Image: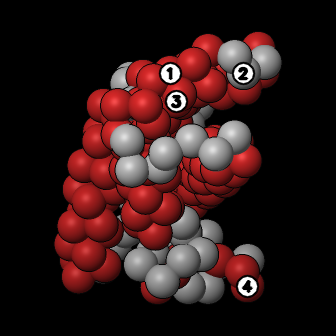
Amino acid sequence: MDRLPPRIALKQLSDFLHEASIFYNTQLMDFTREHQRQGHDTSNEALRQWLWNDWTRSRDNPTRENFTSTKASITLLLRQVETAIATPWLENADLNARFEFSYRALKSSCDEIVRLSGKVMSDWQTCRFLAVELKNARVYANPEGPVLRQLFVGWEKGEPW
């Protein structure tokens, strides 16, 4: 079975997390602007919830598809990472232990993203939590970020890992 190198699989997940974070933050900002532009009472939680439900239903097809595909995309990309790391790839025990810790945090965060993405269109607060969780997960997925960078030192010089 063909599998991606861990760095590439993590980068693809990281890139998707980044794009999804931008998407959900944009949706929240657009919703808030529309809510304020129409002069709605921002302290009325029930009204805000009703407006969110109405607002998400009135989005165009590509936007609704972005809302509904997050769960499947995260699941597939995380499975791709799991396949990539199934074969031991770090020879240093300390680096391997560090990666395992980071991976558990990433998996936990992705599980929460999957859970939240299932209800994001019906609850505006869930969208806020999802936007934050997407950023958190990216910290653990990005092979060039502060958490995983030390695992891939030398890669940019043509060394395999």
Q: Spatial distance from mark 4 to mark 2, Cα to Cα?
A: 46 Å
Label whose residue precedes the other's in the sequence (1 or 2): 1
Classify residue 33 as left or right of residue 89: right
Any mark on residue 157, and which? 4
Pointer 2: what residue?
Answer: 59
- Residue name at image x 57 percent, y 41 percent: 40
Q: Is residue 143 visible?
A: yes
Viewer-side label of 4, 1: 1
Dots 3, 2 in contact, CB < 8 A: no
Identify the secondary structure beneath mark 2.
loop
Percent of width and height locating residue 146? 48, 83
Q: Is residue 39 placed above or below 105 in the rendered structure?
A: above
Viewer-side label of 3, 2: 3
Any mark on residue 161, and which? none
Classify residue 82 as left or right of residue 51: left
Q: Spatial distance from mark 1 to mark 2, Cα to Cα?
A: 10 Å
Q: Spatial distance from mark 3 to mark 2, Cα to Cα?
A: 11 Å
Any mark on residue 52, and which? 3
Which amino acid type is shown beneath numbered disc 1? Asn
Pointer 1: what residue?
Answer: 53
- Residue name at image x 43 percent, y 58 percent: 132
Dots 1, 3 in contact, CB < 8 A: yes
Classify residue 106 as left or right of residue 148: left
Viewer-side label of 1, 2: 1
Classify residue 6 as left or right of residue 98: right
Q: Nearer the viewer, residue 121 or 51?
A: 51
Label whose residue precedes the other's in the sequence (4 or 2): 2
Percent of width and height locating residue 51? 53, 28
Which amino acid type is shown beneath numbered disc 4? Lys
Dots 4, 1 in contact, CB < 8 A: no
Q: Is residue 161 placed above or below 126 in the rendered structure?
A: below
- Residue name at image x 23 percent, y 82 percent: 94
